[in-house]
Amino acid sequence: MAALDQSAAQADSRKGRLIATPAALYLLLFFMIPLGVIVTYSFATRTATGRTVLTGWNLSSYDKLFSELVLRIVWRSFWMASVTTILCLLVAYPFAYYLATRAPKVRNILLVLVMIPFWTNGLIRIFAIRFLLGSDGPASQLSENLGFGTFRILFTPAAVVIGMVYSFLTFMVLPLYVAIERMDWKLVEAARDLYAGGTVAFRKVTWPLTRSGVIAGSILVFVPSFGSYVVPEILGGAKTMLLGSYVARQFGAARNFPFGAALSVVLIAVMLIAVVINQRAEANRA
Amino acid sequence: MSTTMRPTKWASRLLALNAWLVFAFFYIPIIVLVVFSFNGSRRVNIWGGLSTRWYPEVLQNEVILDALKNSLMVASISTIVATILGTSLALALDRYRFRGRKTLDGAVFLPVIIPDVTMAVMMLVFFAQVFRFIDSFGPRFQLGIYTIVISHIAFNISFVAVVVRARLGQLDPSLEEAARDLYASGWRAFQKVTLPLILPGVLAGALLALALSLDDVVISAFVTGPGSTTLPVYVFSAIRRGVTPELNAISSLMLLASTVLVLGSLFLQREPKSKTNNQGE
Amino acid sequence: MKLKLTGALLLLALVAAACGSDGDSGAAASCAVGETDGDLSFYNWADYIDEESIPRFEEEYGIKVEYTMYESNEQMLAQVDAGAANYDLIVPSDYMVDTMIAEGLLMELDFDAIPNATNISAEFQSPPFDPDHKYHVAYQWGTTGIGISYDALEELGNVEPTWGFIFDPALSGMVSGGISMLDDAPESFSAALKYLGYSIDEVLVGGNEEAIREAGELLKATNANLLKYDSVSYSDDLMNGELAVAHGWSGSFAAAIFEADAYETHVYVIPKEGGVRWVDGMAIPASAEHPCSAHAMINFMTDAQNGAALTNYVYYASPNEAATEFILDEILEDEGIYPNAETSAQLEFIPQAGELGLLMQDLFVEAKG
C-alpha cells in the first residue's frame, strides 16, 4: 500500500512537472536569465557620461540606497499604494459580488463591460481624467453651481489616488470575481441558517472562501501602484517623488543604470519575500 | 438564485448602487475621451468647437494605423500564448507536488513585482547579448515585433497564472479525482471537468493580459525594432508635440470595434456554455 | 536542477559576450552625393517630419523608408547603445549628440555627400556639443523660456520678464494663478543658474559644483511655490487657465497659442537673464548598415524647400538659412519661435555635464523632497 502511494506520488510529481515545464522554461529563458543582467548591473560602474561598464565591481550603488531621501520616497510610495489598494478592495469586493451573482449571460456581458475601457490607450484615458479633475472641469463646476465654490483636485495626492484606483481597479475586480463566482453557495446558505445573521455568515464563510481572490487582487493592485509613475506625474504634478519615477529616472534621464538596478533588486527582493511569506501563511491556514 | 440566498433587500440595493457607481466611474472618463475626439482643435486640451475632421484624418494616417496594427498583433499573440502557459502553470502549482515547485511558486510573482522600466532595460540588454552571441555563428537578428511579443508573454504568463490560481484556490480537487476515475484519462478529466470549472478564471486572466499588452509602453519602447512601433509608444512620443484629438479618435474607434466584437460574439453564443456554474443563481 | 545549471551557463556566456563587445567608434562613411545603399531605417520622434517628405524621398531615390519612433532621447540611446537593431538615421538633441560622440556611437559624416549642409546657418555649424561639426546636421531648434498670461504680467506690474517670476518669492507671490517648471533636471537647473547670474556653459563645463548646489537650494526653496512640474501639457494648461506662468519650450507654447488663438491673452518670453537654446540634429549611428542612404536623407532634409516644409509643419525654428524664404511669414514673425537678435545672443546650449549631470539629477529629486 505504501509502495503504491509512493508510485502514485511519483507519477503525480512527473505529471506536475510536465505541465509546468513549458511555462517554467519560458520564464527561465525570457525572464530569469535577463534578470541576471539587472543583478549584474547593480554591481557595475557608471562612467562620467553615464555608460555602464562591467568592470570594477562594487557595492556603491547599494550604499546609496540607504539614504534618508530614498527611505522617504519608499515610505511615501508605500503609503500611496496602501491607500489605493484598500480603496480598490472596498469598492471592488461588493462590485465583484454583484457581478458574480448575476445570471451567467448577464455576468459575462458585465465582465466585458468592465474591461472595454481598458482596451483603449491608457495615456489618453488619464488625460480624460485630468480634464474631469481640473479646476475648470465638470467636477469643480458642479460644486461651484451647488454653491461650494471651485476646488482643485488635480495636482494633489488625491488626484494620484483617484487615477491609480481607476487604472488598477480591474486588477482587483477580476480575481475577486473569479473567486466569488466559484464560491460554494450552499456553505453560505448553511452559515446563514446557522448564524442567522448576514454579517456573521459573511465573516465566517464568504470572506474566508474568497480570500484567495482578495490576496491575488491586493497583490495585483499594490505592486503596480507602488511602482507607478505615469499617473503620479500627469495627475499629481510630479511635485513629490515616488518610487516608480525614481527608478524610471535612473534608467532614463539620470542614466545611472547601476543604481537603478540596485534599487530594483532590493525592491524585488523585499516584495518577493512579502509575497512568499503571505503565501506560506495561506498554505498553513488551508 | 435560491430564495434563501437572496440578500436582504437593502443590501442588494446597495450592491446594485455600488455597481452602477463603479460603471459610472469607469465610463465617465471614456465619455470624455469620446467627446474630445470631436474636438476641432489640434490640441486635445484646448476646445476648438465640434468637428468630425479627426476620424477621416486618422483613418488616412498610416503611421497611426501601422502602430495600431502592430499593437493588435502583439496583444493577440501574447494573450493567447500567455493564457495557455499561465493556466498550465497555475494548474501545476496548485494541483501537483513536484521538485522545484516552491521555487517556481515564488518566481511566478517576479514579473508582476518588477518595475516595468527595469524589465524593459533587462530585456533590451538580454536580446542584444543573445543577438551578438548568435551573430558569432553567422545569422543576424534584430529587434522587432517578435521581441515585443516575447517580452509581453513573459510578464503576462504571471498575471494569468495569478488570476487563474485565485480560481483554483476555491475548487475541490476531489471533483477532479472523481472525474479521473470516471474517464480514466487525465486529459479527458481535464477537458470535461477542470476546464469548464476554471474557465471563468482563464477568461479573466486573458482579458487582463490583453489589456496589459495593449497598454504597455515602457517595455515595448525598449525592445521595439525598426518599423515595429506600437500605438502606446507612438502616443508617448507624440505627446511631446501635444496630444491631438486624432489619438482620441483612434481610441474611440478601438472602443467601438471591441464593443461590436464582444456583443457580436455574445449574441452568437446565446446558449450559456456550461451548466455547472449555476449554484449562484 | 539541470535547468539551473543551463541557466547559469547561458548567463555566463552572455556576460562574457557583453565584456567582449565594444562599439565600433570612429567609424566614418564615404558616399557620393545622392548615393543610396539600401532601404533607410529612420529613428525619429513621432510627428516630427512633414507628411510629404518621406514619400517624396522614396520616390526620388527609389528606396523605402522605415520610420520608427522613440519617446525620449534616453530610450533612443539605450536602443542604439545596445546595438540590437539597425537604425541608419537618428535625431538626437544637442546634449545627446555630445553623449553619443563621447561614447563612440556616432559615425563621422561625409560632408561631401551633404552639399546642402552649407544651407545651415553659421551659428549651428559649430555648436559646443559638436564644435567641429563632424557628427550632426541641425534639424530643428527652439528655446526654453516662460509662457505667461497677460493677466499675470499685469499682476507683476508689467516689468521686464525675468526668471524671478518663478524664483523670486516676492514676484511669484504676486501671481494668483499656478506656476510650473519643466520636469527635467538640466532645464530646471539651467533656469536657476541663469537667474543666479551664472553662465550655464561655464558652470557645467567648468565643473563649478558650488554653483550647482546653490541652484539646487534655489529649486528646493521654490518647490513649495510651484503648482507642478510638467514637461508635457504645461502649454495647454496655460491656455485653459490652470497655469499662469509656465517654464517650457518655445515650440510647445507657439503651437498652443496658435491653436487656442490666444495671441491677445498669452505670450512666450525669454527672460532678461537669458534662456536656453536647444537643437535637434540628424546623425548616423556608428553601427548603421545603410550610411549612404542616411546621407542622402540628411541632404534631402537640408534642402531649402524641404527644410521649410518641415518647419511649416512642426512649427519649430529652422536652422536652415536657405529655407527662410519658403517659411510661412506667421512663423518667421513669431518672436516666440524666432527670437530677435538681442535675445538670441543671450541663449546658451546645455552641455553634456558629466558627473555634474548626475549631481543635478540627484539634487533635483532632493529639491522635490
Image (spheres, rainbow, N blue to C red):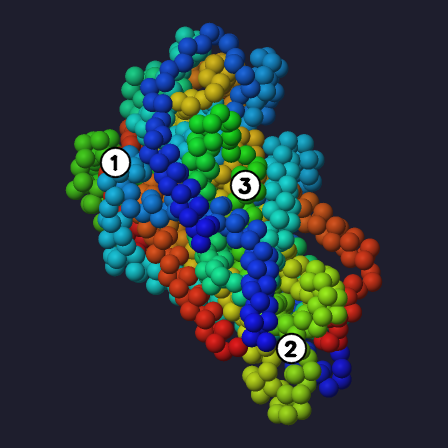
- Residue B258 in percent (x, y) is at 70, 50
Residue C46 visible (yes or no): no
**Callout 1 secondary element:** loop
Residue at 34%, 63% in the rendered image: A75
Residue C59 x/y as whole percent: 62, 15
Find numbered disc 3 in the image and state the secondary structure of the residue it sits on. helix
Residue C128, disc:
none
Mark 1 lies on residue: A48
Side of C118 relative to B76 (left or right): left
Q: Is disc 1 surrounded by few (<14), some (14 to 19) or many (20+) residues within 10 Å?
A: some
| Nearer mark to the viewer, of 1 and 3 | 3
Q: Is residue C286 visible?
A: yes
User: Label 2 is found on which chain of the structure?
Assistant: B
Which residue matches tag 2? B14
Residues C224 and C359: in front is C359
x, y percentage for residue C289?
Answer: 47, 20
In this picture, is C189 found above or below C276? below
Left or right relative to A118: residue A85: left
Residue A159: x, y in percent? 47, 60
Circle 3 residue: B148
CA neighbours of label 2 inside 10 A, class few (<14), some (14 to 19), many (20+):
some
Is C77 situated above or below C151? above
Q: Amino acid at mark 2?
A: Leu
Check disc 3 and give the amino acid type.
Ile
Name above or below for residue C183 compared with residue A133.
Answer: above
Q: Amino acid at mark 1?
A: Ala
| Residues flagged by tags 1 and 2 on a common chain | no
Identify the image quadrant of the N terminus of chain A: bottom right
Number of callouts? 3
At 23% from the left and 48% from the top, the residue drawn is: A60
